Amino acid sequence: MSEQFIIGALFSVVQFAFFLWIKTSIAKTDKNADELIAFKLLVANNYVKQAQLDAHMERLDKSLDEIKAMIERLMVRNANL
């Protein structure tokens, strides 16, 4: 066997291993991208949006203000007795 044939065969093996490594790396990247997309969809479907949270907080604040006013009226009424 000639030296050129051996060098060519070794180069071919290294080239094949490199392309195989690239192919598996791309497959892993695609899998990670798909998992990220699925996670983002899960978060978007299951968690509260900021506008919904703000509306809920406004209702809670209003309810707390009403309770505070009721307590103040009770205190005034008890003070007058």
Image: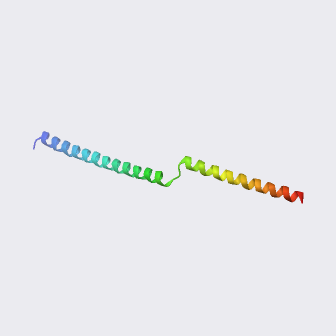
State how the image is colored. rainbow
What is the quadrant of residue 3 in the picture? Answer: top left
Q: Position of residue 67 (x, y in %)?
A: 73, 56
In the image, is 59 to the left or to the right of 67?
Answer: left
Residue at x-position 76% and y-position 56% = 70
Where residue 32 appears, as percent x and y from the top left, is 37, 50
User: Image point 12% across, 42% down: which residue?
Assistant: 5
Residue 16 horizontal/vertical position (percent): 22, 46
Place of residue 19 in the rendered image (x, y in percent of width and height, measured from the top left): 25, 45
Q: Residue furthest left?
A: 1
Residue 74, compared with residue 51, is above or below; it is below
Q: Quadrant of the C terminus?
A: bottom right
| 63 and 18: which is toward the camera | 63
Is 63 or 41 nearer to us in this picture? 63
Residue at image location 86% in from the left, 59% down from the top: 78
- Give the quadrant of the N terminus: top left
Q: Residue furthest right?
A: 81
Report the front residue among 7 and 45. Answer: 45
Residue 79 located left or right of residue 27: right
Q: How many numbered markers are drawn? A: 0
Q: Is residue 25 left or right of residue 64?
A: left
For image coordinates 76% across by 53% down, the residue present is 69
Front residue of this view, candidates 27 and 79:
79
Above-or-below relation of 2 to 42 = above
